């Protein structure tokens, strides 16, 4: 990450989005990435809740030992097989566990999981940092915004500014952590590198404010978004009207 790109975005973000919070990023590394280890979880744990610290400016480092939730372990690339009876947990439950009822049947869960490509992160750590905490040594994989609707509308429109096909962003079904890590990271490997709108998971919703969703975009795609800001709709009166509500 060059200091020029880092500072350029901060200036443009303030110019067009006012005092809206800066995004966070993540990247995989064999070192610590200048971050501190996240505490080892005790009791129920959700990484979406823990990322509130990153949004406030603390840089955190994770590996498999720092994640307790099986979903987080899988969608961050540290575990392939889910817990026994996961197909019942995500659907209708059984006599041993209560089901979350996010899919209708265990068979649908199995089919859904079968169609997913496995992310492999064994032997590497994952770092989460706020944008202004990045250094020249950092190479972000994905940029993540926690955004209210007006901000989300700007990001969504900017991401489609240089597209000729309608689906420059997409909203895949999955957990909160899959929507900000797994799906956008997989897009890093694709030609289009689409952005992902997420945080619709009811289990993760208590970890974010009521009016906030996420917008996650591969870093290479995000660089194009930055380069488009000064010639896009952001310079029009239409956006100035929206910006007044952002504050």
Image: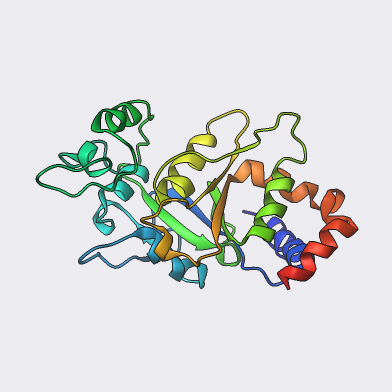
Q: Is residue 224 above or below residue 36?
A: above
What residue do we see at 41% from left, 65% from top? 207
Mark yes or no: residue 140 visible: no
**Taking 220 as reference, is 200 left or right?**
left
What residue do we see at 27% from left, 33% from top? 105
> Residue 130's x, y, as percent?
54, 64
Q: How many labels does the image show?
A: 0
What residue do we see at 39% from left, 57% from top? 204
Q: Nearer the viewer, residue 20 or 140?
A: 20
Q: Nearer the viewer, residue 228 or 203?
A: 203
Q: Residue furthest left?
A: 95
The part of the image, by quadrant, that contains residue 202 is bottom left
What residue do we see at 56% from left, 66% from top? 133
Q: Which of 48 and 64 is in front in this view?
A: 48
Q: Is residue 206 above or below residue 167?
A: below
Q: Is residue 225 above or below residue 138?
A: above
Q: Which of 139 and 43 is in front in this view?
A: 43
The part of the image, by quadrant, that contains residue 62 is bottom left
Q: In which quarter of the image is the C terminus?
A: bottom right
What colour scheme does the image use? Answer: rainbow
Q: Residue furthest right?
A: 237
**Taking 49 as reference, is 67 left or right?**
left
Mark yes or no: residue 8 visible: yes
> Residue 140's x, y, as percent?
54, 50
> Residue 246's x, y, as percent?
72, 69
């Amino acid at each position: 990450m060059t200091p020029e790109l880092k500072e350029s975005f901060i200036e443009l973000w303030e110019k067009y989005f006012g005092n809206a919070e800066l995004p966070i990023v993540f990247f995989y590394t064999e070192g610590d990435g200048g971050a501190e280890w996240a505490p080892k979880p005790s009791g129920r744990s959700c990484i979406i809740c823990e990322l509130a610290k990153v949004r406030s400016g603390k840089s955190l480092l994770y590996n498999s030992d720092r994640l307790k939730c099986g979903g987080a372990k899988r969608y961050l690339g540290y575990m392939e097989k889910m817990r026994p009876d996961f197909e019942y947990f995500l659907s209708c439950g059984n006599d041993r566990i209560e089901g979350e009822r996010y899919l209708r049947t265990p068979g649908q869960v199995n089919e859904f999981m079968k169609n997913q490509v496995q992310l492999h992160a064994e032997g590497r750590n994952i770092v989460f940092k706020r944008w202004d905490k990045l250094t020249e040594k950092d190479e972000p994989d994905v940029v993540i915004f926690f955004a209210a609707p007006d901000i989300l509308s700007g990001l969504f429109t900017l991401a489609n500014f240089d597209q000729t096909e309608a689906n420059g962003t997409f909203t895949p079904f999955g957990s909160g952590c899959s929507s900000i890590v797994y799906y956008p990271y997989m897009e890093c490997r694709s030609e289009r590198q689409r952005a992902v709108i997420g945080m619709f998971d009811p289990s993760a919703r208590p970890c974010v404010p009521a009016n906030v969703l996420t917008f996650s975009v591969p870093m290479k795609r995000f660089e194009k978004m930055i380069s488009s800001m000064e010639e896009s709709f952001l310079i029009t009166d239409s956006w100035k009207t929206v910006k007044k509500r952002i504050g």
